[in-house]
Amino acid sequence: MINIKNVSKSFEDIKAVKDTSLTIEDGRVFGLLGTNGAGKSTLLRMMSGVIRPDEGEIYIDDEFIWDRPELKEKIFYISDDQYYFSNSTPKGMATFYQKYYRSFDMDRFLELLKIFNLEADRKIARFSKGMKKQLSIILGISSGAAYLLCDETFDGLDPVMRQGIKSLFASEIDEKGLTPVIASHNLRELEDICDHIGLLHKGGVLLSKDLEALKGDLTRVQCVLPPELDDEVRQKLTILRMERRGRLLTLTARGQAEAVLKELSAYGPVFIEALPLSLEEIFISETEVAGYDIKSLII
């Protein structure tokens, strides 16, 4: 488990991360969302022990990570900007990482190279952006690290390869208890893979919730009710959003679908149905309550 407690980090006059606290549980996929400049990359680098927080502390399994090489073996950080040694090859990079990750599995590495059609002895400089990203992920999986910190993991990957990487993550989570932490500015990209979502905005945590809890706690309903009932509906339910077009009322309310439908059905609507909510719609509703316009924060 990774515990981030009241962490802050500044670069000159820029406050990149502000008093941030998060808990990342083992064996689950944690999605870290936010716009460019929200503090995602800085937070990942602090979690990996690359840079030290100005304030606060970061623990892995209740141990302080900074300046602890044996703990850093549990973390593999994949930067958004891929870096490899000049004239290096995939096999050469794997040999390099073997020196720092004692559990590095070379057989697994070579097996994954074949699965993803990457040549072990080809110069990485000749790889495309997507191929370089695939190689980083394969190195991370093969390292034996318990936590894979991924900055914009799917950027540069085609749709088929994205699904392949997601399947690989699922397999590693099931078999080895891998914990991926995936930072992205694209909410829709992570909807089908994450168990928990944290939303960063201007260096702070705007929201951190279990995905199933998010989905189960909100209900979107479309019904036909006369406008004069709107105030009474607002008193009966905890309304996050409400829109009316003539007699057609669309609302998002806090609570289980069964309970919300029961309350509205008491008014004898001509028509009523619960509508599915996407993760994007859930965040729009949650953040608007907090006073933010999420459409200006993330894609």
Image (cartoon, rainbow, N blue to C red):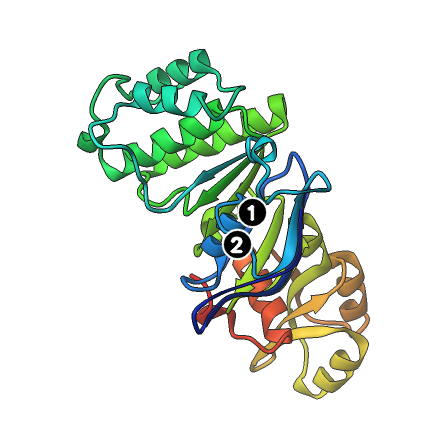
Q: Secondary structure at mark 1?
A: helix
**Looking at the image, which residue is at 29% across and 34% down?**
84
Q: Quadrant of the N terminus?
A: top right
Compared with 228, 137 (above or below) is above
Q: Secondary structure at mark 2?
A: helix
Locate residue 20: give its quadrant: bottom right
* Closer to the camera in the image, 202 or 117: 202
| Amino acid type assigned to the residue bearing label 1 in the image | Met
Compared with 231, 203 (above or below) is above
**In the displayed structure image, the side of residue 234 where residue 38 appears, left or right:** left
Residue 235 position in % (x across, y down): 79, 81
Residue 132 position in % (x across, y down): 30, 34
* Closer to the camera in the image, 146 or 186: 146
Locate residue 257: give its quadrant: bottom right
Compared with 286, 144 (above or below) is above
Q: Which residue is mark 2?
A: 43
Measured Cα–Cα span from mark 2 to mark 1: 6 Å
Compared with 58, 63 (above or below) is above
Q: Is residue 278 visible?
A: no
Q: Quadrant of the C terminus?
A: bottom left
Residue 241 position in % (x across, y down): 62, 74
| Amino acid type assigned to the residue bearing label 2 in the image | Leu
**Looking at the image, which residue is at 55% across and 67% down?**
284
Question: Mark 1, residues whose alpha carbon is within 10 Å: few (<14), some, or many (≥20)?
Answer: many
**Looking at the image, which residue is at 74% across and 80% down?**
234
Question: Mark 2, residues whose alpha carbon is within 10 Å: few (<14), some, or many (≥20)?
Answer: many
Q: Which residue is mark 1?
A: 47
* Closer to the camera in the image, 4 or 129: 4
Residue furthest toward the top?
Answer: 107
Q: Are marks 2 and 1 in contact (CB under 8 Å)?
A: yes
**Looking at the image, which residue is at 44% across and 74% down?**
13
Locate residue 162: give its quadrant: top left
